[in-house]
Image (spheres, rainbow, N blue to C red):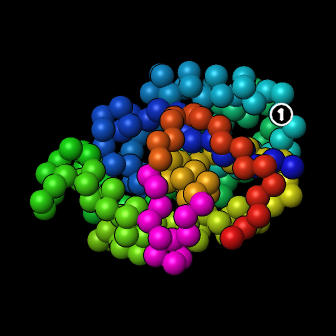
Amino acid sequence: MVLRLVRHGESEWNLAGRVQGQCPEAGPLTARGREQAARTAELLAGCRADAIISSDLSRARETADIIAATLGLEVLIDPELREQNLGFLEGRAFADPLGNGTVQDVIDGLWWEPRRHPEGGESILDLYQRIHAALARYEGRDLVLVAHGGPVRVATTTADPRTGESVPRVPVGNATVTPLGSFVGK
């Protein structure tokens, strides 16, 4: 059994360089994002997934719907697969000045200090615990899970933020597939 994590296709705010987090105004997929999702659907066409489970955020749902049309599967929604809540940072440009750096610097710092919360948001530790609890519920099933960059990072890290360990902020491309194999919850 395999859990396949898919990051959503390029969204309008990805293209604009804006922080999305859980912001409902983050916008739909771009034309390129829909093309990315269609290519990912073709890549997954031979898989034996039982279902597609998606974050409830529109950019993930739109990606999941495109994949579902190719695979002939229903899309189920799981809000636990949402991106990290980035609180007051959401909607800002990554390059905007903030304190002694930029919004991007603040976000990078959250990955270095996994217990730190942005004002009104959740920490990397919170995200890690939420995503690992969701993945544990799906253990032993063959599924496509459509989520976001943060959830993919915390699902695949070997770091343990529960001990205060920094989590690498590795790149996760739009509409990429990350197989987890047989996931064993930590």
Relative to 157, does residue 58 appear above or below in the rendering?
above
Of residue 91 and residue 118, the one placed in the foreground of this image is 118
Query: Which residue range is magenta in the image?
Result: 158-169
Q: Pointer 1: residues within 10 angstroms few (<14), some, or many (20+)? A: some
**Which residue was labeled with disc 1?**
47
Q: Is residue 119 left or right of residue 167?
A: left
Q: Residue at x 44, y 65 (%)?
A: 166
**Quarter holding residue 65:** top right
Is 168 one of the magenta-colored residues?
yes
Relative to 180, does residue 15 appear above or below in the rendering?
above
Instruction: Tell me where residue 99 appears, x and y as whole percent.
Output: 13, 62
**Quarter holding residue 69:** top right
Instruction: Tell me where residue 131 appears, x and y as whole percent.
Output: 61, 63
Of residue 26 and residue 123, the one placed in the foreground of this image is 123
Q: Is residue 74 left or right of residue 79?
A: right
Is 78 one of the magenta-colored residues?
no
Q: Residue at x 40, y 61 (%)?
A: 111
Instruction: Tell me where residue 123 appears, x and y as whole percent.
Output: 42, 70
